[in-house]
Image (cartoon, rainbow, N blue to C red):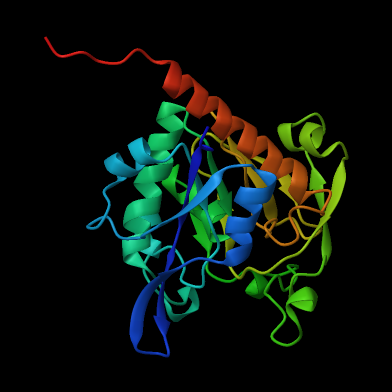
């Protein structure tokens, strides 16, 4: 039997600075295939090519990945400034309504880094343009030099809400994570429950309150070494189980017959 399908949202990319492409990190697909036990499918971040309504029927769950462009501040009622960086309005147009639809339907969705921020904005929250500029905050950005192993190395602890979903899933009150982001949650959206914090108070783990399906999202990058990392593995396994459950439920629905 075919594995359930996880749509992995892509990022706009120029190959050799000239050829437009929809790109996705290999480690995202590997985490979905090997740890979540689902079939990864790269989704174009352009609603003109594949409307959200179609994606919801084609895919059983969605992974909202990290990406260099940021959510446009107009999406949370603020004006654009140089500090907000670059944008991908087409991805905004896919990801934000997709999150809201998944929450409503109970369809599994997991956000990573930018995806974490998309979930917050989709639920009515806002973002700081640059965390490291705030008093008392650390620099959460990816180190500019070094190997991939060095850039994705564990860098700080995340304190988890005692008795919360992440605490139960990870089996520990604190976990070690990497950190490769510039922006972060300013105001949590409606129904956004923060369940994890960096030492400087930056939100790191969220869920959507009273959502009928899987809505866990993290600010760090669990796709790195997901098969071996004790924090990443249970997260992708739980997401995969939720996707399998959704697919099984969908297959169990009676077929519609025409008169």
Lateral position of residue 233 relative to residue 29, left or right: right
The answer to whether any part of residue 224 appears in the image is yes
- Give the residue displayed 76% in from the left and 64% down from the top: 178
Residue 245 higher or lower than 176, as above or below: above
Residue 94 higher or lower than 144, as above or below: above
Q: Residue 70 appears at what percent x and percent y?
A: 46, 67
Residue 240 higher or lower than 67, as above or below: above
Q: Quadrant of residue 228?
A: bottom right
The C terminus lies in quadrant: top left
Q: Residue 160 appears at what percent x and percent y?
A: 79, 42
Q: Quadrant of residue 134?
A: bottom right
Outermost residue toward the left in this view:
259
Viewer-nearest residue: 222 or 188: 222
Q: Residue 195 appears at what percent x and percent y?
A: 71, 40
- Give the residue displayed 73% in from the left and 46% down from the top: 196
Viewer-nearest residue: 87 or 8: 8
Q: Quadrant of residue 124?
A: top left
- Give the residue displayed 59% in from the left and 65% down from the top: 26
Lateral position of residue 138 relative to residue 71, left or right: right
Outermost residue toward the front in this view:
1
- Give the residue displayed 59% in from the left and 31% down from the top: 242
The answer to whether any part of residue 120 appears in the image is no
Q: Residue 179 appears at what percent x and percent y?
A: 72, 66
Count up the numbered dots.
Answer: 0
Lateral position of residue 127 relative to residue 169, left or right: left
């Amino acid at each position: 039997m075919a594995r359930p399908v996880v749509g992995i949202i892509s990022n706009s990319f120029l190959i050799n600075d000239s050829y437009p492409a929809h790109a996705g990190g290999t480690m995202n697909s590997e985490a979905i295939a090997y740890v979540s036990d689902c079939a990864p499918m790269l989704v174009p971040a352009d609603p003109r090519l594949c409307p959200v309504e179609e994606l919801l029927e084609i895919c059983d769950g969605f992974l909202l990945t990290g990406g260099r462009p940021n959510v446009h501040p107009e999406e949370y009622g603020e004006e654009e400034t140089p500090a907000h960086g670059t944008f991908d309005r087409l991805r905004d147009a896919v990801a934000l309504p997709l999150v809201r639809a998944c929450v409503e339907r109970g369809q599994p969705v997991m956000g990573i880094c930018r995806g974490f921020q998309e979930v917050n904005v989709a639920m009515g929250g806002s973002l700081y343009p640059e965390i490291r500029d705030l008093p008392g905050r650390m620099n959460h950005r990816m180190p500019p030099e070094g190997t991939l192993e060095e850039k994705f190395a564990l860098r700080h602890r995340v304190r988890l809400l005692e008795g919360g979903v992440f605490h139960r899933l990870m089996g520990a009150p604190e976990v070690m994570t990497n950190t490769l982001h510039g922006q972060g949650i300013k105001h949590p959206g409606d129904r956004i429950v923060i369940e994890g914090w960096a030492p400087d108070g930056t939100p790191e783990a969220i869920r959507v309150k009273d959502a009928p399906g899987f809505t866990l999202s993290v600010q760090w990058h669990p796709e790195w070494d997901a098969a071996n990392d004790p924090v990443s593995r249970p997260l992708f396994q739980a997401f995969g189980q939720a996707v399998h459950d959704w697919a099984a439920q969908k297959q169990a629905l009676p077929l519609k017959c025409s008169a």
